[in-house]
Amino acid sequence: VLPEIILEEPVLRVDPKGTSVRLIGIGGTGVVTVAAILEVATLLDNKFSRGLDQTGLSQKAGPVISDIHISDDEDIGSAPIPAGNADVIIGFDLFGTASQKNLRVADPQKTVAIVSLDAIPNGAQVTDVNHAAPDVKVALDTIAKFTNAEKNFYLGAQSLSQAVFNDQIQANVILLGAAWQLGLIPITLRSISEAFRMNGVGIQENLDAFSWGRLSVVHPEIIDNMLGPDTQPLPTSQPSSDLVAKYWLSEGKSKELLVQLVEQLRAYQNDSYAKKFLVRIRQVSDIAAKRFTDPNEIVQQFARHLYKLMAYKDEYEVARLHLDWYEQSPKDTKFAMLLHPPTLRSLGLKNKIALRRSANPSMKFLRAMKVLRGGPLDIFGYSKLRRWEANASEIYTKTVIETLEIASENQAIEVLAIITTPDLVRGYEHVKEANIKRYETKLKSLTAQIVSDVKSSPPVTR
């Protein structure tokens, strides 16, 4: 169900007197239908449009392109968009959008791309199960090269459509809603809504899908909370500062800190992991802003301690940190890395082992295997300690949120005491396990105290 949030109309970022839009998708995804909706809505706004649908290959998994020019002037010109003249590209298919042939209409200075990140199988993959899937990073880098990378917007439209409608058919309308909310479609909301009604097919579903696309721009954290970060992969070429800006609106030390921590979490695991971190920060920030006059210290301390719990030192991270050090050291550096792996210790190894340069290939393999972290194939993740580490950040976040929801302005010190409790979690193996018990005991005691204080004295919020 759509959240009851008032979504204000955007400020146009394109020339309303003349805007060229290219839609790129694959057969069966309704690209032509979306183009028709735009053209009807243009007429309802008393404007002029000219379009060209390239549907010669619209069979299963074939490319479909629609060019539309929207203008206040009846003398629009030719329908196909000339090279370098597209204002907007809406990519319903990531790999089709990344085709250099389809991107010839783009200009890196002005063209903004709104692209679905969900990878749709192409024709070769459909007919040959052994055909290798295209590289997502290469596709994203190609789009960034031909368009205005700083203004582009990416959304897992198929994932969102599946979650909301139990079907992916509304994905294109969701993406259209995102493009409109970004101020890239010079047509009024009234006319677009009326065009959907005149179409007469799935009217309410289309109107809702359009609103979900708008919501993904204004409140991305709602989409993230609903889908989970892993369903919304982020462009690997996007700077960490841009990722933070999507969730953090204010400037200053808090934002600088988040940029640093996000950059480190991207290296630790991947973009999705860093995004999960940002979603949790936004949740806590929104609640803290309602409960405290100055929530900055609370948010900063939560960010530092959440990072500590998320970036725990497992086998993959030890390998990565070692290789980072080695790759920055002089080539003739001699070293011995002393390790006492828990897995080998459980098999009876009593003393540390010394690893030298010859172990680097194994370290590189281990570093690459971080993609398995937390999953069923993570062979190191089945120990009691690793299971605790994998779940600790989620439990900690839940505890902080529950505390903030009942705490009052005069309990800021007690709240900070709870937020900084992860400082107790330090050391390795048996030392860390003992500190974990201290951490859990203190966390339970502090939260119980706040609950007790609230019951005896109702909270006063600002």
Image (cartoon, helix red, strand yellow):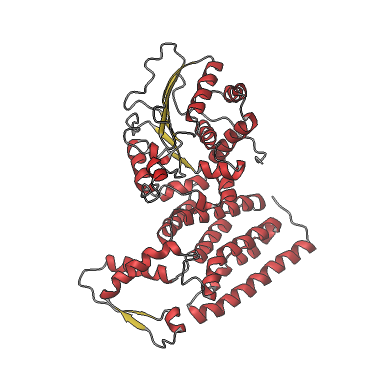
For the N terminus, the image quarter is top right
Does the rendering let one see residue 395? yes
Residue 115, image x, y percentages = 45, 38
241 lies above or below 410:
above
Residue shown at the point (33%, 41%) measured from the top left: 142
356, above or below 29, in the image: below
Residue that extends furthest to the right in the rendered view of this protein: 456
* Quadrant housing residue 102: top left
136 lies left or right of 389: left
Residue at 32% x, 71% y: name it: 362
Looking at the picture, does residue 12 appear above or below residue 340? Answer: above
Q: Is residue 248 visible?
A: no
Instruction: Choose top left, top right, bottom left or bottom right for residue 322.
Output: bottom left
Q: Position of residue 214 (x, y in %)?
A: 56, 36
Frontmost residue, 254 versus 159? 159
Count of residue discs: 0
Residue toward you, 387 or 305: 387
Q: Does residue 255 appear left or right of residue 403 in this picture? A: left
Residue at left offset 44%, top offset 13%: 73
